[in-house]
Amino acid sequence: MQVRKVDANTNEPLSGAKFRVEKMNGERIGDFITNSAGFFVVSDLEAGWYVVYETRAPAGYIMDSTPQNVELKPNRTAVASQTDTLLRVVPFPLLMLSICVA
């Protein structure tokens, strides 16, 4: 199984996203972090249904906490792709005060 993480606006790969992979019955497969190419691979899985949860977004991004169900078929690679949105900081206008001392 390959899990990809990309920027929601640019589709650029995102490194440093943390995920948990479990079987549908809740059995934990492991925790994984996307590499510099924006993905990780989980090998040696049995065919069946799995759930992929993002547990930490890359720095500066808003996490997509929606679990994703993934079906892994025999002799095939399943690809799960998720997006995160860049956290935009809106600057407040600078307010200048003038104080007069009499």
Image (tube, rainbow, N blue to C red):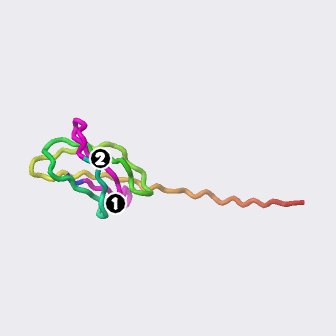
Q: Quadrant of the C terminus?
A: bottom right
Label 2: how many residues lie within 10 Å, few (<14), some (14-19) or many (20+)? some
Q: Position of residue 53 (x, y in %)?
A: 31, 45
Check residue 73 for magenta coloring. Answer: no
- Contact (CB < 8 A) between labels 2 and 1? no
Q: In the image shown, does 54 or 30 lie closer to the viewer? A: 30
* Image point (12%, 46%), residue name: 73
Q: CA distance from mark 2 to mark 1?
A: 15 Å
Label 1: how many residues lie within 10 Å, few (<14), some (14-19) or many (20+)? many
Tell me if residue 59 comes above or below residue 65 in the rendering.
Answer: below
Check residue 9 for magenta coloring. Answer: yes
* Image point (31%, 64%), residue name: 36
Q: Is residue 46 left or right of residue 27?
A: left
Tell me if residue 23 comes above or below residue 63 in the rendering.
Answer: above
| Residue located beneath label 2 in the image | 20
Q: Quadrant of residue 50?
A: top left
Q: Quadrant of residue 60?
A: bottom left
Boundaries of the magenta span: 3-29
**Please, what is the three-letter code of the amino acid marked with disc 1?**
Ser
From this viewpoint, which residue is outermost toward the left? 75
**Please, what is the three-letter code of the amino acid marked with disc 2?**
Arg
In terms of secondary structure, where does tag 1 sit? loop
Q: In the image shown, does 23 or 10 lie closer to the viewer? A: 23
Q: In the image shown, does 45 or 14 lie closer to the viewer? A: 45
* Image point (42%, 57%), residue name: 59
From this viewpoint, which residue is outermost toward the bottom? 36
In terms of secondary structure, where does tag 2 sit? strand
Q: Position of residue 88 (x, y in %)?
A: 49, 56
| Residue located beneath label 1 in the image | 15
Q: Give the mark nearest the N terminus, 2 or 1.
A: 1
